[in-house]
Image (cartoon, helix red, strand yellow):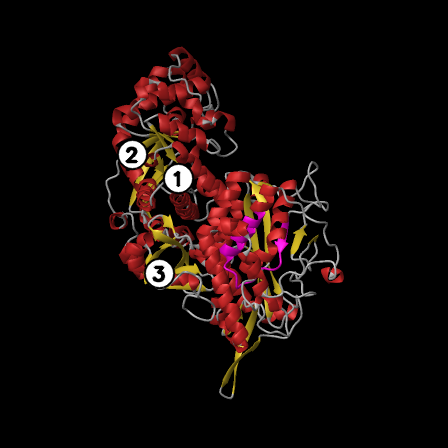
């Protein structure tokens, strides 16, 4: 997905942003504690808990990475002292990439810098005037005698001062939320306001205004000036430090102000994403033309998911040209950097997700970046500079990505498919042509491609597929992946289409989608799958003129020595899988010489099949970079252990595991739905093997006493059974959460293998099939009573040929082609047994 949205990522990272709400920095030696950089908490007791917050831990790492120092508070503070304010400010503001800063200088810090000093760090610095601060300054000025004051005399001075600076500021700000709350009465009576004013004057100096009637009057008087001079009014909403009452900071309390006709043209900016009232703010911006939103402070003070959730909630209803970025930076230049860095990342994540969901096109998302980070603030605050625009991106990108950018960044795109013999194949397109043409129109491919076998690249007899006729390989852009081991290449899974939008009946991905749709439509159930990848690492030696691939080591199951010896390879494998967003649950050495296993987390089965192909590509390619070979062949050495691709399967109704039993329905830990589905797999298993163990070599692996499932049976936690129900940690002992199929290997096309399993399960559900009693010990002990699973591929093929259910659900033409490929391989390897040796290069 990252590469798919490369231009969007570039826009978020390169746009010179307008910071529309921030505060003054402090000089070196200020008493203001650096720990306040990470939290709104105040006081030693509260600040002592700050290092235990998600925001602190993440932000400290971000700052340490910028400074290239150890991620500890002590080391960061030491670096700050050594570098000095000018140096660290330069680093932070350069990394933040801000074209303008709008500063509310109404907060007073120890050794606070004047507004002009900030122009060293940003091209444009403008002022936001805080109305409560101005009022307090007027009242606290010793040249005025409180006894002679009236509300009118105060108002005259207050309005005069506001008017005198109206052309020197870009907006007003109110912190009424901190003082008396947002339920402001725009029609407060002059009598109540006068009474409130008198109460304020009777207090001690310096005065801090708190009387609600007086604040309501002050706010309304300021709005009148804002309307007159076309100045936006920023309003603190939502969370902040402990001075405020959060219950009174919900922006819905502003309804009386918003409904007042006098102020309908006054642009009101709700600050801080109104968190935790982001949805309420979004609603207000959607129904009131004068309401705008600013998400500073929420980003970066929340957790990553909190930031994403808050911005998503703002955009649920609010127009994108009403949502603005700010850092809410204060005191320390690091706060500006953190706000900008995280805002860019969160904006990218939210907008790319909107593209994935179909809410936005990439072009529209890039336009939204310009709006949110820059253009909305420029328009609202009437800023007149033009540097830092990403217009060159937005004009170059229409419904396709900027070709010039793509070609600088990516050279090739591999369009990947997996054929009937389970081999990974690809067509490679230069990136410029891919993004210009192939990503929408696909590339041509011969009909013969789905008739090829593991020993020849021609169609097998009986497949009904020849070199006459062509399909289109159409990229599924949701699967686009930058190759972790080759950063100038991408790969993408392809659908096979006979014409645009029409699936080819031989397409494996479509076959899986088709049967999972039946499962969902008829039973409201989806299937999740998690694969265990077993493979051998081999190293090359040259003996005379012969090139030999020998075991990487000679160690036992779960050997610490084996893992240590291959640790550098496995670390790279893990990192590459993580970069591909493929979740690894466990890694360990297996029982064979140089054999390892990488177990993947369960996901929706259609995604699991794609991820399995990508995982194999990653493992093989990373191994190759380390000078060794990874082979997934089921039985590369007839005298050693086999490699399976065991798959764990479960059934889900929305977020509920419906394979698992309950107090109402419990058959050996399974639900009734679970039992019927598994019974279908049980009864069709000999036919299913033609898909999941599809090569003659597969049956060298499926032998008794090798944990591969040689007999037709099932059992709870029975690793010798081909079907094992599992009770992993966290599941009650009397229940099972999933079942495992042992007889699945890497010669299988994962989409076809899973399609066959789903088809078998559907038959079990339709017919209400029941399972026999489980086998609770080694099935080999019951060899005289249990039916042996097919001992060779021919038996499986014969079962499949007679299985009308799988023909019907998967598609007769596709099943016919699969059978023909299997028969060709049976014949070839029977006549050429030495050819097995070459298969380590194909699987």
Q: Which mark sits nearer the N-terminus, 3 or 1?
A: 1
**242 falls in the magenta region:** no
Q: Please count the marks in the image.
A: 3
**741 falls in the magenta region:** yes
- Kindly report the distance in space between the C-alpha atoms of the residues bearing marks 3 and 1: 61 Å
Instruction: Quickly name the residue at label 2.
Output: 380
**Does residue 147 appear left or right of residue 125 in this picture?**
right
Observer-side mark, 2 or 3, equals 3
Observer-side mark, 2 or 1, equals 2
Q: Nearer the viewer, residue 347 or 736?
A: 736
Q: Position of residue 690 (x, y in %)?
A: 55, 60
Q: Residue at x 44, y 51 (%)?
A: 510
Instruction: Quickly name the residue at label 3.
Output: 445
Location of residue 533 by image quarter? bottom right
Q: Residue at x 32, y 48 (%)?
A: 15
**Does residue 314 appear left or right of residue 127 in this picture?**
right
| Numbered disc 3: secondary structure | strand
Q: Which residues are magenta?
A: 738-761
CB contact under 8 Å: marks 3 and 1? no
Q: Residue at x 62, y 54 (%)?
A: 740
Q: Position of residue 417 (x, y in %)?
A: 42, 59
Q: Nearer the viewer, residue 402 or 75?
A: 402
- Kindly report the distance in space between the C-alpha atoms of the residues bearing marks 2 and 3: 54 Å
Instruction: Quickly name the residue at label 1.
Output: 23
């Amino acid at each position: 997905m990252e590469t798919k949205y490369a231009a969007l990522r570039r826009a978020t990272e390169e746009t010179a942003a307008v910071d529309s709400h921030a505060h003054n920095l402090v000089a070196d030696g200020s008493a203001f504690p650096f720990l306040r950089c990470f939290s709104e908490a105040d006081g030693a007791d509260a600040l002592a808990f700050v290092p235990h917050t998600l925001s602190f831990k993440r932000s400290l790492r971000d700052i340490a990475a910028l400074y290239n120092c150890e991620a500890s508070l002590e080391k960061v503070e030491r670096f700050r002292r050594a570098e000095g304010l000018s140096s660290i400010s330069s680093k932070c503001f350069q990394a933040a990439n801000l074209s303008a800063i709008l500063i509310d200088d109404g907060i007073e810090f120890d050794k606070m810098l004047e507004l002009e000093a900030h122009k060293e760090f940003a091209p444009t610095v403008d002022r936001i005037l805080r109305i409560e601060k101005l009022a307090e300054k007027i009242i606290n000025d010793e040249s005025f005698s409180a006894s002679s004051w009236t509300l009118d005399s105060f108002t005259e001075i207050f309005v005069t001062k506001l008017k005198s600076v109206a052309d020197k500021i870009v907006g007003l700000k109110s912190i009424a939320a901190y003082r008396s709350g947002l339920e402001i009465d725009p029609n407060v009576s002059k009598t109540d306001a006068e009474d409130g004013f008198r109460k304020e004057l009777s207090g001690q100096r310096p005065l801090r205004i708190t009387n609600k009637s007086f604040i309501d009057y002050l706010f309304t008087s300021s709005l009148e000036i804002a309307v007159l001079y076309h100045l936006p009014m920023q309003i603190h909403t939502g969370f902040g430090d402990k001075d405020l009452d959060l219950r009174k900071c919900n922006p819905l309390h502003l309804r009386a102000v918003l409904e007042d006709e006098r102020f309908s043209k006054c642009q009101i900016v709700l600050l801080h994403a109104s968190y935790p009232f982001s949805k309420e703010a979004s609603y207000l911006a959607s129904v009131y033309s004068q309401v705008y939103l600013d998400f500073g402070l929420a980003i970066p003070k929340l957790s990553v998911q909190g930031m994403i959730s808050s911005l998503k909630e703002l955009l649920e209803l609010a127009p994108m040209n009403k949502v603005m970025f700010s850092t809410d930076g204060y005191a320390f230049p690091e706060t500006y950097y953190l706000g900008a860095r995280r805002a860019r990342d969160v904006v990218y994540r939210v907008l790319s997700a909107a593209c994935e969901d179909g809410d936005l096109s990439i072009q529209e998302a890039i336009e939204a970046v310009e709006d949110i980070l820059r253009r909305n603030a420029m328009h609202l605050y009437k800023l007149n500079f033009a540097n830092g625009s990403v217009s060159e991106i937005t004009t170059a990108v229409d419904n396709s990505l900027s070709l010039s950018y793509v070609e600088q960044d990516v050279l090739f795109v591999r369009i990947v498919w997996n054929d009937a013999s389970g081999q990974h194949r690809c067509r490679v397109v230069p990136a410029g042509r891919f993004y210009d043409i192939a990503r929408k129109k696909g590339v041509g491919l011969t009909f013969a491609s789905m008739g090829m076998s593991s020993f020849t690249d021609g169609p097998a007899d009986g497949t009904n597929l020849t070199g006459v006729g062509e399909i289109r390989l159409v990229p599924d852009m949701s699967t686009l992946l930058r190759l972790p081991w080759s950063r100038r290449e991408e790969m993408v899974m392809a659908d096979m289409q006979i014409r645009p939008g029409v699936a080819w009946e031989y397409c494996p991905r479509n076959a899986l989608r088709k049967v999972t749709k039946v499962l969902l439509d008829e039973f409201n159930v989806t299937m999740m799958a998690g694969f265990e990848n077993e493979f051998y690492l081999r190293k090359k030696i040259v003996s005379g003129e012969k090139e030999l691939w020998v075991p990487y080591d000679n160690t036992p199951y779960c050997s610490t020595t084996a893992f240590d010896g291959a640790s550098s390879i496995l670390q790279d494998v893990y990192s590459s899988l993580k970069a591909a967003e493929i979740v690894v649950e466990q890694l360990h050495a297996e029982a064979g010489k140089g054999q390892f296993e990488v177990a993947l987390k369960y996901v929706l089965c259609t995604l699991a099949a794609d991820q399995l192909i990508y995982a194999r590509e990653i493992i093989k390619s990373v191994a190759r970079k380390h000078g060794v070979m990874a082979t997934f062949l089921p039985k590369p050495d007839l005298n050693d252990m086999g490699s399976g691709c065991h798959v764990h399967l479960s059934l889900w109704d929305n977020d509920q595991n419906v394979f698992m039993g309950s107090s109402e329905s419990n058959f050996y830990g399974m639900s009734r739905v679970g039992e019927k589905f598994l019974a279908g797999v049980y009864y069709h298993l000999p036919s299913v093997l033609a898909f999941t163990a599809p090569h003659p070599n597969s049956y060298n692996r499926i032998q008794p006493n090798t944990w591969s499932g040689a007999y037709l049976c099932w059992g709870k936690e029975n690793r010798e059974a081909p079907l094992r129900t599992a009770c992993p940690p966290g599941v009650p002992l009397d229940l099972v959460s999933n079942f495992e199929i042992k007889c699945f290997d890497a010669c299988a096309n994962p989409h076809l293998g899973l399609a066959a399993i789903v088809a078998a399960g559907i038959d079990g559900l339709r017919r209400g099939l029941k399972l026999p009693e489980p086998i609770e010990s080694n099935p080999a002990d019951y060899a005289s009573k249990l039916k042996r699973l097919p001992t060779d591929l021919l038996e499986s093929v014969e079962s499949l040929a007679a299985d009308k259910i799988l023909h019907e659900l998967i598609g007769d033409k596709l099943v016919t082609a699969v059978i023909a490929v299997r028969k060709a391989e049976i014949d070839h390897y029977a006549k050429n047994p030495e050819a097995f040796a070459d298969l380590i290069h194909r699987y």
